[in-house]
Amino acid sequence: MRRDYVNVAILWFVMTLAAEFSLPWIFQIIFPGVAAEEAAISDESFRLLTILATPVFTFVMSVLGYSLFSFRAKGGAPEYGAPIRGNSGWVWGMWLFITASLNVVVVIHPGLTGLAKFQGNKVPDLVVKVTAVQWAWRVSYPAQIIDGATEVVLPLNKRVKFEVTALPDDVLHSLWIPAFRQKIDAVPGLVTSMYVTPDKIGTFDQDFNLRMQCAELCGTGHTAMMMPVRVVSAEDFDKWVKDQAEPTDPVARGARLAKTQGCIACHSLDGAVGVGPSWKGLFGKQEALEDGSSVTVNDAYLLESIINPNAKLTKGFKPDIMLKDFGTKLKQDQIDALIAYIKTVK
Ligand code: CUA
Protein backbone atom coordinates (compact mmCIF):
# COMPACT_ATOMS: atom_id res chain seq x y z
CA MET A 1 0.00 0.00 0.00
CA ARG A 2 2.71 2.47 1.00
CA ARG A 3 4.56 1.57 -2.19
CA ASP A 4 1.47 2.50 -4.23
CA TYR A 5 1.36 5.93 -2.59
CA VAL A 6 5.00 6.51 -3.51
CA ASN A 7 4.41 5.35 -7.11
CA VAL A 8 1.38 7.61 -7.53
CA ALA A 9 3.32 10.52 -6.04
CA ILE A 10 6.16 9.98 -8.53
CA LEU A 11 3.71 9.63 -11.43
CA TRP A 12 1.88 12.78 -10.35
CA PHE A 13 5.13 14.72 -10.07
CA VAL A 14 6.37 13.66 -13.52
CA MET A 15 3.00 14.30 -15.21
CA THR A 16 2.69 17.73 -13.59
CA LEU A 17 6.21 18.69 -14.59
CA ALA A 18 5.66 17.58 -18.20
CA ALA A 19 2.27 19.34 -18.44
CA GLU A 20 3.42 22.61 -16.87
CA PHE A 21 6.45 22.75 -19.16
CA SER A 22 4.41 22.18 -22.31
CA LEU A 23 1.77 24.81 -21.36
CA PRO A 24 3.56 27.81 -22.95
CA TRP A 25 3.68 25.91 -26.21
CA ILE A 26 0.00 24.89 -25.94
CA PHE A 27 -1.01 28.48 -25.16
CA GLN A 28 0.68 29.64 -28.34
CA ILE A 29 -1.46 27.28 -30.38
CA ILE A 30 -4.86 27.66 -28.73
CA PHE A 31 -5.20 31.44 -28.33
CA PRO A 32 -6.92 33.16 -31.26
CA GLY A 33 -5.72 36.54 -32.59
CA VAL A 34 -5.70 39.42 -30.11
CA ALA A 35 -6.64 43.02 -30.91
CA ALA A 36 -7.58 44.74 -27.65
CA GLU A 37 -6.04 45.61 -24.28
CA GLU A 38 -8.78 43.70 -22.48
CA ALA A 39 -7.95 40.54 -24.42
CA ALA A 40 -4.58 40.40 -22.66
CA ILE A 41 -6.32 40.47 -19.26
CA SER A 42 -8.61 37.66 -20.33
CA ASP A 43 -5.80 35.54 -21.78
CA GLU A 44 -3.65 36.11 -18.70
CA SER A 45 -6.50 34.87 -16.48
CA PHE A 46 -6.94 31.83 -18.67
CA ARG A 47 -3.20 31.08 -18.44
CA LEU A 48 -3.11 31.44 -14.67
CA LEU A 49 -6.21 29.27 -14.14
CA THR A 50 -4.82 26.58 -16.43
CA ILE A 51 -1.47 26.59 -14.61
CA LEU A 52 -3.26 26.24 -11.25
CA ALA A 53 -5.69 23.60 -12.51
CA THR A 54 -3.00 21.42 -14.06
CA PRO A 55 -1.75 19.78 -10.81
CA VAL A 56 -5.35 18.99 -9.84
CA PHE A 57 -5.97 17.43 -13.24
CA THR A 58 -2.72 15.41 -13.21
CA PHE A 59 -3.45 14.25 -9.63
CA VAL A 60 -6.81 12.77 -10.66
CA MET A 61 -5.29 11.29 -13.83
CA SER A 62 -2.31 9.71 -12.05
CA VAL A 63 -4.46 8.08 -9.33
CA LEU A 64 -6.92 6.86 -11.98
CA GLY A 65 -4.24 5.68 -14.42
CA TYR A 66 -2.16 3.97 -11.75
CA SER A 67 -5.18 2.19 -10.29
CA LEU A 68 -6.32 1.00 -13.71
CA PHE A 69 -2.99 -0.66 -14.45
CA SER A 70 -1.95 -1.72 -11.00
CA PHE A 71 -5.19 -3.12 -9.60
CA ARG A 72 -6.77 -4.60 -12.72
CA ALA A 73 -8.00 -8.22 -12.55
CA LYS A 74 -5.01 -10.42 -13.24
CA GLY A 75 -6.84 -13.70 -13.75
CA GLY A 76 -7.84 -15.95 -10.85
CA ALA A 77 -10.81 -15.30 -8.60
CA PRO A 78 -11.69 -11.67 -7.93
CA GLU A 79 -11.18 -10.70 -4.31
CA TYR A 80 -12.17 -7.74 -2.22
CA GLY A 81 -9.51 -5.39 -0.90
CA ALA A 82 -9.15 -4.64 2.79
CA PRO A 83 -11.97 -2.36 4.01
CA ILE A 84 -11.08 1.23 4.81
CA ARG A 85 -12.75 2.49 7.96
CA GLY A 86 -12.78 5.81 9.75
CA ASN A 87 -10.86 8.93 8.77
CA SER A 88 -8.27 11.15 10.26
CA GLY A 89 -9.27 14.75 10.86
CA TRP A 90 -6.15 16.27 9.43
CA VAL A 91 -6.66 14.59 6.01
CA TRP A 92 -10.07 16.09 5.30
CA GLY A 93 -9.07 19.26 7.12
CA MET A 94 -6.11 19.71 4.81
CA TRP A 95 -8.25 18.83 1.77
CA LEU A 96 -10.81 21.46 2.72
CA PHE A 97 -8.11 24.01 3.49
CA ILE A 98 -6.20 23.54 0.22
CA THR A 99 -9.24 23.53 -2.09
CA ALA A 100 -10.94 26.43 -0.26
CA SER A 101 -7.82 28.59 -0.34
CA LEU A 102 -7.25 27.83 -4.02
CA ASN A 103 -10.83 28.91 -4.73
CA VAL A 104 -10.60 32.08 -2.67
CA VAL A 105 -7.35 33.00 -4.39
CA VAL A 106 -8.74 32.67 -7.92
CA VAL A 107 -11.99 34.45 -7.02
CA ILE A 108 -9.90 37.45 -5.90
CA HIS A 109 -7.27 37.14 -8.62
CA PRO A 110 -7.78 36.94 -11.55
CA GLY A 111 -11.56 37.08 -10.82
CA LEU A 112 -12.25 40.40 -9.09
CA THR A 113 -9.03 42.12 -10.14
CA GLY A 114 -9.61 41.19 -13.78
CA LEU A 115 -13.22 42.39 -13.69
CA ALA A 116 -12.10 45.71 -12.20
CA LYS A 117 -9.55 46.12 -14.99
CA PHE A 118 -12.13 45.27 -17.67
CA GLN A 119 -14.52 47.94 -16.43
CA GLY A 120 -11.89 50.33 -15.11
CA ASN A 121 -12.22 53.36 -17.33
CA LYS A 122 -15.88 54.22 -17.89
CA VAL A 123 -15.24 57.40 -19.85
CA PRO A 124 -15.45 56.36 -23.50
CA ASP A 125 -13.85 58.23 -26.39
CA LEU A 126 -16.40 56.70 -28.72
CA VAL A 127 -19.90 55.24 -28.33
CA VAL A 128 -21.14 52.59 -30.74
CA LYS A 129 -24.79 51.63 -30.56
CA VAL A 130 -25.69 48.13 -31.60
CA THR A 131 -29.21 46.78 -32.02
CA ALA A 132 -29.70 43.08 -32.67
CA VAL A 133 -32.52 41.87 -34.88
CA GLN A 134 -33.25 38.48 -36.34
CA TRP A 135 -30.73 38.19 -38.06
CA ALA A 136 -28.54 41.22 -38.36
CA TRP A 137 -26.64 43.83 -36.39
CA ARG A 138 -27.74 47.45 -36.72
CA VAL A 139 -24.76 49.64 -35.93
CA SER A 140 -24.79 53.38 -35.39
CA TYR A 141 -22.36 56.02 -34.12
CA PRO A 142 -24.57 58.70 -32.48
CA ALA A 143 -21.87 61.38 -32.03
CA GLN A 144 -20.65 60.92 -35.61
CA ILE A 145 -24.25 60.87 -36.92
CA ILE A 146 -23.62 57.56 -38.66
CA ASP A 147 -26.56 55.24 -38.99
CA GLY A 148 -26.69 51.82 -40.55
CA ALA A 149 -22.95 51.20 -40.79
CA THR A 150 -22.10 48.10 -42.79
CA GLU A 151 -18.98 47.32 -40.76
CA VAL A 152 -17.71 48.11 -37.27
CA VAL A 153 -14.81 50.55 -37.68
CA LEU A 154 -12.89 51.42 -34.50
CA PRO A 155 -9.98 53.80 -33.89
CA LEU A 156 -6.75 52.44 -32.41
CA ASN A 157 -6.09 52.89 -28.67
CA LYS A 158 -9.40 54.65 -28.01
CA ARG A 159 -11.82 53.59 -25.30
CA VAL A 160 -14.97 52.34 -27.03
CA LYS A 161 -18.29 51.76 -25.34
CA PHE A 162 -20.75 49.44 -27.02
CA GLU A 163 -24.35 50.13 -26.05
CA VAL A 164 -26.19 46.98 -26.92
CA THR A 165 -29.85 46.08 -27.18
CA ALA A 166 -32.31 44.06 -29.26
CA LEU A 167 -35.53 45.23 -30.91
CA PRO A 168 -38.47 45.17 -28.45
CA ASP A 169 -40.23 42.21 -30.08
CA ASP A 170 -37.07 40.29 -30.90
CA VAL A 171 -35.30 37.43 -29.14
CA LEU A 172 -32.09 37.24 -27.09
CA HIS A 173 -28.82 37.69 -28.97
CA SER A 174 -25.27 38.07 -27.77
CA LEU A 175 -22.58 40.37 -29.12
CA TRP A 176 -19.20 38.68 -29.26
CA ILE A 177 -15.93 39.89 -30.80
CA PRO A 178 -13.45 37.00 -30.45
CA ALA A 179 -10.33 39.16 -30.97
CA PHE A 180 -11.45 41.36 -28.05
CA ARG A 181 -12.37 38.34 -25.86
CA GLN A 182 -15.57 40.01 -24.73
CA LYS A 183 -19.21 39.14 -25.04
CA ILE A 184 -22.40 40.86 -23.88
CA ASP A 185 -26.03 39.82 -24.23
CA ALA A 186 -28.37 41.83 -26.44
CA VAL A 187 -31.69 41.83 -24.61
CA PRO A 188 -34.99 43.28 -25.92
CA GLY A 189 -35.92 46.39 -23.94
CA LEU A 190 -32.63 46.56 -22.05
CA VAL A 191 -29.38 48.40 -22.85
CA THR A 192 -26.26 46.51 -21.85
CA SER A 193 -22.76 47.86 -22.28
CA MET A 194 -19.27 46.64 -22.98
CA TYR A 195 -15.98 48.58 -22.97
CA VAL A 196 -13.09 47.80 -25.20
CA THR A 197 -9.77 49.41 -26.17
CA PRO A 198 -8.55 48.08 -29.54
CA ASP A 199 -4.76 48.03 -29.61
CA LYS A 200 -3.92 46.45 -32.94
CA ILE A 201 -4.73 47.58 -36.46
CA GLY A 202 -6.37 44.85 -38.51
CA THR A 203 -9.28 43.72 -40.64
CA PHE A 204 -11.61 40.75 -40.80
CA ASP A 205 -9.84 39.59 -43.98
CA GLN A 206 -6.54 39.38 -42.09
CA ASP A 207 -7.97 37.75 -38.96
CA PHE A 208 -11.43 36.22 -38.81
CA ASN A 209 -11.50 36.84 -35.05
CA LEU A 210 -12.14 40.49 -35.93
CA ARG A 211 -15.86 40.03 -36.34
CA MET A 212 -19.02 40.85 -34.46
CA GLN A 213 -20.64 37.47 -34.08
CA CYS A 214 -23.92 36.51 -32.48
CA ALA A 215 -23.14 34.09 -29.64
CA GLU A 216 -26.66 33.22 -28.53
CA LEU A 217 -28.65 30.71 -30.56
CA CYS A 218 -31.40 32.90 -32.02
CA GLY A 219 -32.91 30.98 -34.93
CA THR A 220 -32.06 29.78 -38.42
CA GLY A 221 -30.01 32.90 -39.29
CA HIS A 222 -27.90 32.74 -36.11
CA THR A 223 -24.59 31.84 -37.76
CA ALA A 224 -25.12 34.46 -40.48
CA MET A 225 -25.45 37.16 -37.83
CA MET A 226 -21.95 38.46 -38.37
CA MET A 227 -20.41 41.83 -39.18
CA PRO A 228 -16.75 42.51 -39.97
CA VAL A 229 -14.72 44.59 -37.50
CA ARG A 230 -11.90 46.88 -38.64
CA VAL A 231 -9.40 48.60 -36.34
CA VAL A 232 -7.80 51.64 -37.97
CA SER A 233 -5.55 54.57 -37.04
CA ALA A 234 -7.17 57.72 -35.63
CA GLU A 235 -6.64 59.51 -38.97
CA ASP A 236 -8.21 56.69 -40.97
CA PHE A 237 -11.14 56.64 -38.56
CA ASP A 238 -11.77 60.36 -39.10
CA LYS A 239 -11.55 59.79 -42.84
CA TRP A 240 -14.05 56.94 -42.63
CA VAL A 241 -16.45 59.07 -40.56
CA LYS A 242 -16.24 61.82 -43.17
CA ASP A 243 -16.94 59.36 -45.99
CA GLN A 244 -19.90 57.94 -44.10
CA ALA A 245 -21.55 61.16 -43.02
CA GLU A 246 -20.97 63.57 -45.86
CA PRO A 247 -20.29 62.14 -49.28
CA THR A 248 -19.50 65.15 -51.49
CA ASP A 249 -21.37 63.73 -54.47
CA PRO A 250 -25.07 64.72 -54.07
CA VAL A 251 -26.36 61.44 -55.48
CA ALA A 252 -24.23 59.36 -53.09
CA ARG A 253 -25.25 61.64 -50.26
CA GLY A 254 -28.92 61.29 -51.19
CA ALA A 255 -28.60 57.50 -51.38
CA ARG A 256 -27.16 57.50 -47.90
CA LEU A 257 -29.87 59.80 -46.55
CA ALA A 258 -32.55 57.60 -48.11
CA LYS A 259 -31.19 54.78 -45.99
CA THR A 260 -30.45 56.64 -42.76
CA GLN A 261 -33.72 58.62 -42.80
CA GLY A 262 -35.71 55.47 -43.36
CA CYS A 263 -37.18 56.59 -46.73
CA ILE A 264 -36.54 53.27 -48.43
CA ALA A 265 -38.50 51.39 -45.77
CA CYS A 266 -41.67 52.75 -47.46
CA HIS A 267 -40.46 53.78 -50.92
CA SER A 268 -39.07 50.80 -52.81
CA LEU A 269 -36.26 51.16 -55.31
CA ASP A 270 -37.38 48.24 -57.48
CA GLY A 271 -40.95 49.19 -58.32
CA ALA A 272 -42.54 47.10 -55.56
CA VAL A 273 -45.60 48.80 -54.09
CA GLY A 274 -44.97 49.70 -50.46
CA VAL A 275 -46.55 52.03 -47.94
CA GLY A 276 -45.54 54.87 -50.27
CA PRO A 277 -45.00 55.09 -54.04
CA SER A 278 -41.91 53.36 -55.39
CA TRP A 279 -39.05 55.60 -56.47
CA LYS A 280 -38.29 53.46 -59.48
CA GLY A 281 -38.79 55.51 -62.65
CA LEU A 282 -40.64 58.11 -60.60
CA PHE A 283 -38.94 61.24 -61.93
CA GLY A 284 -40.53 62.62 -65.10
CA LYS A 285 -43.54 60.35 -64.72
CA GLN A 286 -47.14 61.50 -65.09
CA GLU A 287 -48.67 60.69 -61.68
CA ALA A 288 -52.41 60.37 -61.02
CA LEU A 289 -53.47 62.03 -57.77
CA GLU A 290 -56.12 61.20 -55.17
CA ASP A 291 -58.15 64.35 -56.04
CA GLY A 292 -58.55 63.18 -59.65
CA SER A 293 -55.99 65.53 -61.19
CA SER A 294 -52.51 64.54 -62.31
CA VAL A 295 -49.03 65.95 -62.01
CA THR A 296 -45.66 65.60 -63.71
CA VAL A 297 -43.05 64.47 -61.20
CA ASN A 298 -40.39 67.19 -61.34
CA ASP A 299 -38.06 68.86 -58.84
CA ALA A 300 -40.80 71.13 -57.50
CA TYR A 301 -43.23 68.24 -56.95
CA LEU A 302 -40.62 66.10 -55.18
CA LEU A 303 -39.65 69.01 -52.94
CA GLU A 304 -43.28 69.68 -52.03
CA SER A 305 -43.92 65.99 -51.35
CA ILE A 306 -40.93 65.76 -49.03
CA ILE A 307 -41.83 68.77 -46.89
CA ASN A 308 -45.63 68.55 -47.18
CA PRO A 309 -46.53 64.93 -48.03
CA ASN A 310 -50.31 65.49 -47.93
CA ALA A 311 -50.34 68.37 -50.48
CA LYS A 312 -50.58 66.27 -53.64
CA LEU A 313 -51.33 62.71 -52.64
CA THR A 314 -50.64 59.99 -55.21
CA LYS A 315 -53.72 57.95 -56.12
CA GLY A 316 -54.00 54.80 -54.01
CA PHE A 317 -51.98 56.04 -51.04
CA LYS A 318 -53.23 57.20 -47.66
CA PRO A 319 -52.56 60.63 -46.11
CA ASP A 320 -50.68 61.14 -42.82
CA ILE A 321 -48.52 58.04 -43.23
CA MET A 322 -45.32 59.88 -44.01
CA LEU A 323 -43.70 62.02 -41.31
CA LYS A 324 -44.22 65.73 -41.90
CA ASP A 325 -41.04 66.96 -40.24
CA PHE A 326 -38.52 66.45 -43.06
CA GLY A 327 -38.76 70.12 -44.05
CA THR A 328 -37.40 71.13 -40.64
CA LYS A 329 -35.34 68.03 -39.84
CA LEU A 330 -33.31 68.08 -43.05
CA LYS A 331 -31.22 70.96 -44.35
CA GLN A 332 -31.95 72.36 -47.80
CA ASP A 333 -28.83 70.79 -49.33
CA GLN A 334 -29.80 67.43 -47.85
CA ILE A 335 -33.23 67.63 -49.47
CA ASP A 336 -31.53 68.60 -52.75
CA ALA A 337 -29.29 65.54 -52.40
CA LEU A 338 -32.31 63.31 -51.81
CA ILE A 339 -34.03 64.67 -54.92
CA ALA A 340 -30.82 64.22 -56.93
CA TYR A 341 -30.77 60.61 -55.81
CA ILE A 342 -34.47 59.95 -56.49
CA LYS A 343 -33.90 61.14 -60.09
CA THR A 344 -31.32 58.40 -60.58
CA VAL A 345 -33.57 55.53 -59.43
CA LYS A 346 -34.67 54.06 -62.75
CU1 CUA B 1 -28.59 36.48 -32.98
CU2 CUA B 1 -27.74 34.27 -32.63
Image (spheres, rainbow, N blue to C red):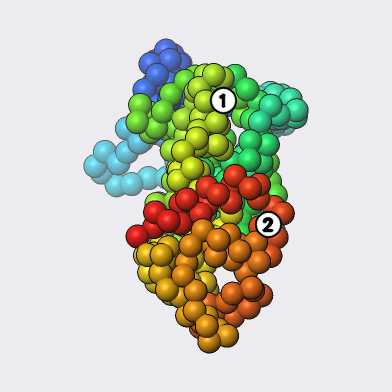
Counting from the top left corner in percent of width and height, residue 315 is at: 51, 82
Answer with left or right where residue 119 lies relative to residue 50. Answer: right
For marks 2 and 1, give the CA distance: 29 Å
Counting from the top left corner in percent of width and height, residue 327 is at: 68, 57
User: Which quadrant would residue 26 be assigned to in this image?
Assistant: top left
Q: Amino acid at mark 2?
A: Gly
Q: Is residue 137 above or below residue 229?
A: below
Ligand 1 within 8 A of label 2's CB?
no
Q: Which residue is more in the foreground, 97 or 233?
A: 233
Q: Is residue 103 above or below residue 81?
A: above
Q: Is residue 60 above or below residue 268?
A: above
Residue 238's label in the rendered image is 1
Q: Is residue 335 visible?
A: yes
Answer with left or right where residue 147 lies relative to residue 108. Answer: left
User: Which quadrant would residue 140 be assigned to in this image?
Assistant: top right
Counting from the top left corner in percent of width and height, residue 284 is at: 41, 65
- The mark nearer the N terminus, 2 or 1, is 1
Q: Amino acid at mark 1?
A: Asp
Question: Callout 1 environment at 10 Å: few (<14), some (14 to 19), or many (20+)?
Answer: some
From the image, tell me which residue sits under label 2.
327
Q: Could you tell me which residue is drawn at 32 percent across and 38 percent down?
A: 72
Quadrant in the picture for the C terminus: bottom left
Q: Which residue is more in the foreground, 214 or 87?
A: 214
Q: Could you tell me which residue is drawn at 47 percent across and 20 percent down?
A: 201
Q: Could you tell me which residue is drawn at 45 percent across and 43 percent down?
A: 252
